[in-house]
Every structure is written in C-alpha cells, then in structure tokens.
Amino acid sequence: MNMDDEEYNSMYTFDENDTSSFTIASASSYAINLPLQILASLVLYTLVFLLGVPGNLLVIWITGFEMKKTVNTTWFLHLSIADLLCCLSLPFLAMQVILDQHWPLGILACKMIPPLTLLNMYMSVLLLAAISADRCALVMMPVWCQNNRTVLKATTVCISLWFLALLMTTPSFFFQSVYSPPLTDKKMCIVDYTKLNHHQSTVKISVVTHRFVLGFIVPFFTITICYGLLIFKIKSSRFSQSNKTLKIILIVIIGFFVCWFPYHVTAIILATQPPTSSLLESTRRANPIVVSLAYINSCINPIIYVFMGKDFKQKSKKNIKSILKNMLMEDTSQFTSESKKTHSMLVERHTETSI
C-alpha cells in the first residue's frame, strides 16, 4: 500500500533503533507472532487476490474479446484492468508483511509496485465519474447521445484518464525509496520525504490533501450532481422499465466509497496528528484493516455484476460467463425510448410552426 513513512512504519510497529540483524529465522518468528490485525489483513489480501484476479480477468476477456464493443463494455473493461493491476500487487504486499517489511526486490520494483494501488484508486474514481456523466447525458440529452456517444470517444476518454491517473501518481513514484535501517541487513520499501529536510511535513500533508481532494472530493461531487440530475429526470418522467446498468453502477460507486473513504480519513489523521495523540495511536492500530478494506474494492466489481442480475437463482444454473455477458450488455432501451420521444416532440413542434 502506498503510504508516507510514518504511516508505513507505524502500521507494522517497526523500531528504527532495533539493531538486531535481519534473518530468515527472525522473519519466520515475526510471521508466527503477527498481531491479530495483521493476520486479518493477510487473510483479506488472500481472499481479494483469489477472487479479484480470476474475476477481473474474466470480465476483461468477455468485454475485450467476446462481446460486441459498446460504450458500457469499454467502461467496464478499463475498470477491470485497473482493478486487476491492484490485485496483482497483493502478493508483494503480503511478502513484506511475512518478511517483517524486508524488501528483497530492489529499487525499481519498489518504485513500480506500490504506486499501482494509487493508480488503481485514481483510475477507478475517474472512471466512475466518467460513467456517471455518461449515464446522466444518456437520459438528459438522448438525441445528442444518439449522434455522439460512440465506442471510439469512450475509448479516447479512457486513455486520457489513464494518463491523468499516471500523472497524479507521479509524486508516489518520485518519493518511493528503499531504506536500510542502521545496523541491520533489512531493506524497506517506503515513501521517503526526508530528502526534503524541514519541508517534509508540509509536503506530506500536501500530498495527502491532494490525494483526498482529487481522489475523493471532486469525483464525489461530480457523481452526486450527475446522479441527482438523473434521479430527478427519471422521477419526473414515465420510465417504467428498470435500468440494470444504472443499478450496477450505483452499487459499484457505493462499494468504492465504502472501501476508500476510511483510507483517506486515516491517511489525513496519520499525516496531521502529533505523535502523542491518542487518536493517532488508535488509527495506527486500525490502519492494517483499513488498508485491506481499500483493496477489497478491486475484487467486488465482478461479484456485483453477477449478483445484480434478474432472477439470480435461475441464472445461477448458467455458467458465470453467460451471467456476466448479460449484465455488461449495453442497455439502451431507456435511451432509445427517450430519444424517440424527444424526436417526436421536435417533429410535432416543427409541424405546428409550418401550419
């Protein structure tokens, strides 16, 4: 997980003054005596990896190779790619925990692997905001969408969001470093602000604030406004058919915020509270579970797609691939109905004007 050095060390109670040499035996002893919250986080990492990797690979295969290319499948394809990248970083995180935070993979891997979590966070939230805007436009401007809503444009948006997410992850890549505690053979992969000297506290708070605003607040208001307009439009219209895609996206969004909001809150507390704060101490103890909760978001989306189907008990008799295909299919009935209605009104007005 990408964290500042204080959060990272406090999570695993590493003592910089410990002069004992790092050995496989000492790491094994540590693994046997892991605190309960660390053991719980390891169990969650294992479950997320076992569910998230095959689940997201299946969604990527279906949306990328087996289904007709639509705007919806484009969104879900890129969302699953982001989630898969995050899941693939979990074995390395578990390795650190088991080896008492020893990092044997070198500086390049240290700079590449931990930022994958932030990349996933940014890409997921940017995609969810884009999906919300897409659904809002689909209902609010159906005629415009009929002429302009294309797979090519959705793909262009996704590629642009990847570049933006990479740009926002750059600070993590820059400050990621391998640290060797004095008088030990241990090497730790941490986010190190010490090179900034007396500016490190300011930069640490700035990074956390930047992450919270761009990774949570701005997308939250974007999504809230889009869905507020969408709900208002649906309630004021005569839509009788339920929109399965809308239901999926709403639950995906709720899942994202439930998983990531505690992470942002704890990050702010760890960056701003004084060392003697009781709040800081309790947050440190809770942090391993909070980090694990953030990773859960990377495996829940394929599960949501399956369980959100109509008559799930009947569908469970089919194979999972068929269920996913059905759930990820473009749902244009509402869009088409509203588009026809709007087109009819325009023709009617034109006729009245001509008469």
Image (tube, rainbow, N blue to C red):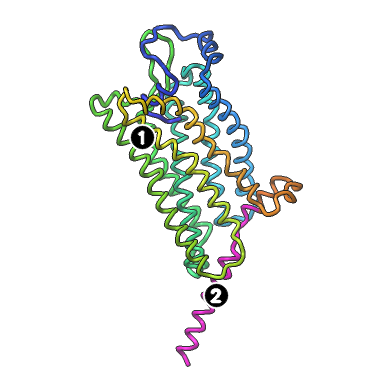
**Residue at x-position 62% and y-position 56%:** 329
**Helix or strand or loop: what does disc 1 sit on?**
helix
Residue contact at pointers 2 and 1, CB within 8 angstroms: no
Task: Give, as a three-letter code, the residue at label 2.
Answer: Lys
Placement of 321 over or under 49, stated as above or below = below
Tell me how many marks there are. Answer: 2
Q: Nearer the viewer, residue 91 or 299?
A: 299
Residue 348 colored in magenta in the image: yes
**Location of residue 281 by image quarter:** top left
Please give the residue where the numbered disc 1 appears in the rendered image: 268
In magenta segment, residue 274:
no
Q: Earlier in the sequence, mark 2 or mark 1?
A: 1
Query: Is residue 127 placed above or below 355 in the rendered structure?
Result: above
Give the percent coordinates (x, y) of residue 124. Answer: 48, 44
* Relative to 172, 22 lies left or right: right
Residues in magenta?
A: 327-355
At horizontal 54% and vertical 52% (from top left) the residue drawn is 249
Looking at the image, the residue that sits furthest to the bottom is: 355
Quick one: 290 or 140, which is closer to the camera? 290
Camera-near label (2 vs 1) is: 1
> Is 247 on the left or on the right of 230, as rendered?
right
